[in-house]
Image (cartoon, rainbow, N blue to C red):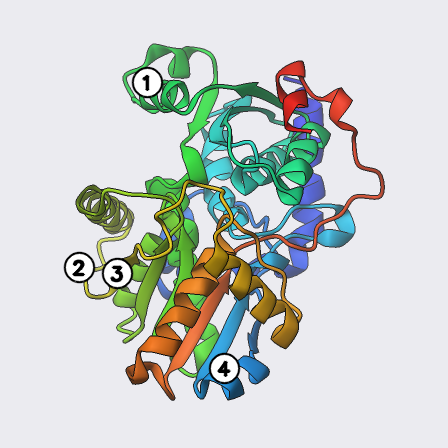
Amino acid sequence: MNQWKKFNNIIFLYLLFLPKTMQNHFLFKYFPSLKSQIHYIPLAQLPTPINKLKNLSTYFKTNLYIKLDSLAGNLDNHLYGGNKVRKLEFLLADALKKEADTILTFGAIGSNHVVATACYAQKLGLNCIGFLKKQPISTYVHRNLLLMHYFNCKTYLFSQSERNLIQKILIDPNFDFVKNEKLYVIPAGGSNTIGILGFVNAAFELKEQINNGIIPEPDYIYVAGGSFGTSIGLSLGLQILGLKTKIRAVCVEPIELEKVLLDAKLLFEQTNQLLHFYDSIFPIISFNAKKLKFITKMSENDYGLAIPEGAAAKNIFEIYEKINLDDTYTARAAAALINDLQSNTKLKNKTILFWHTFCDNFTLPIMPTYTQLPSDFHQFF
């Protein structure tokens, strides 16, 4: 790697985000000892805004708010947003600490995670590789494939079973190739103990916004879930803070609920133990399934497939609030929220926060063309 280029890119990011740097350290404000133990790069534009959904609140007779992680990227500098940037603040810092020169990660052909990883890896002088599986084609899938190319991500197409097998091998800490080739492997969605720290931090950010009167303490948070790192981190952070808020993680593809619960409990506990290891003051708490519920009613169709309930939710959010949702994640989460509001009278007059994870407003002056992509991907255009 060109070390001078890498150094320049780090300095560029430091200067770019300097005004925001201290604002990003919400977790470190509460547990200062963690700052010297956990490696962190302030990539996201934090805190992301919270707005009242006034029209939908009136329509559903409740108090609806939205957390705009769609605005987590610096659009003026063509830096991608969405919820994945929060995880990358910790993951890419860890990669640099371990002197990696290449990031390898996993997703579908429309993966927001792979786009975000490629974007910030490039800015930090790191190479990026994406192992991708197919998903139904949409406008945003086309956009994200082209953005992966724009951010110099080397992409390879695999079947889902092949990709899952490769990921299982590569994330094994005993796999020598990872150690020898300075390759840093990030699992799909960035959902491991390091990535989840980004959403523990987000829970502390939310607490600051509650303290500042931006939003009352939410009764519920609705958020889309694929790899579930977002919901696990939020749940851990909110419980540490003693908030009453319950997470509703809306599954975006068919799952084995029992397995997902076991995996979520394990990641919750491992992340909790990691934070306690770095700062013994950080409490150890028990996983509470009542605080983190997985909603499966919108997950019967395959990943990435538009569903009628999602299409209706997209229209409602666009008409009432001028908010754009994507078919794969946020439309399903919004559909579950609307379904619950319509069928559950107990939600009336509650405070509900919809966590908007999709980077819906990202554009480039000039987009690449699909003919510039590897030939395996031309079929999707």
Disc 4 versus disc 1: distance between alpha carbons? 46 Å
Residue highlighted by disc 1:
169
Vertical comparison of 133 with 250: above or below:
above
Front position in the image: 295 or 42: 295
Displayed quadrant of residue 127: top right
Residue 293 is tagged as 3
Question: In this orientation, does residue 197 appear?
Answer: yes
Image x and y of residue 241, in percent: 30, 70
Image x and y of residue 325, in percent: 58, 58
Disc 3 versus disc 4: distance between alpha carbons? 28 Å
* Residue mark closest to the camera, 4 vs 1: 1
Total labels: the figure holds 4
Q: Residue at (49%, 42%) from the top-left corner?
A: 304
Disc 4 and disc 2 in contact, CB within 8 angstroms? no
Image x and y of residue 284, in percent: 18, 56
Looking at marks 2 and 3 on the same chain, the residue that comes earlier in the sequence is marked by: 2
* Residue mark closest to the camera, 2 vs 3: 3
Disc 4 versus disc 2: distance between alpha carbons? 27 Å
Looking at marks 4 and 1 on the same chain, the residue that comes earlier in the sequence is marked by: 1
Badge 3 amino acid: Lys
Q: Secondary structure at mark 4?
A: loop
Residue highlighted by disc 2:
285
Badge 1 amino acid: Ile
Badge 2 amino acid: Ile
Badge 4 amino acid: Asn
Displayed quadrant of residue 239: bottom left
Residue highlighted by disc 4:
212
Residue at the right extreme, as displayed: 365
In the rendered structure, the answer to whether residue 280 lies left or right of residue 334 reads: left
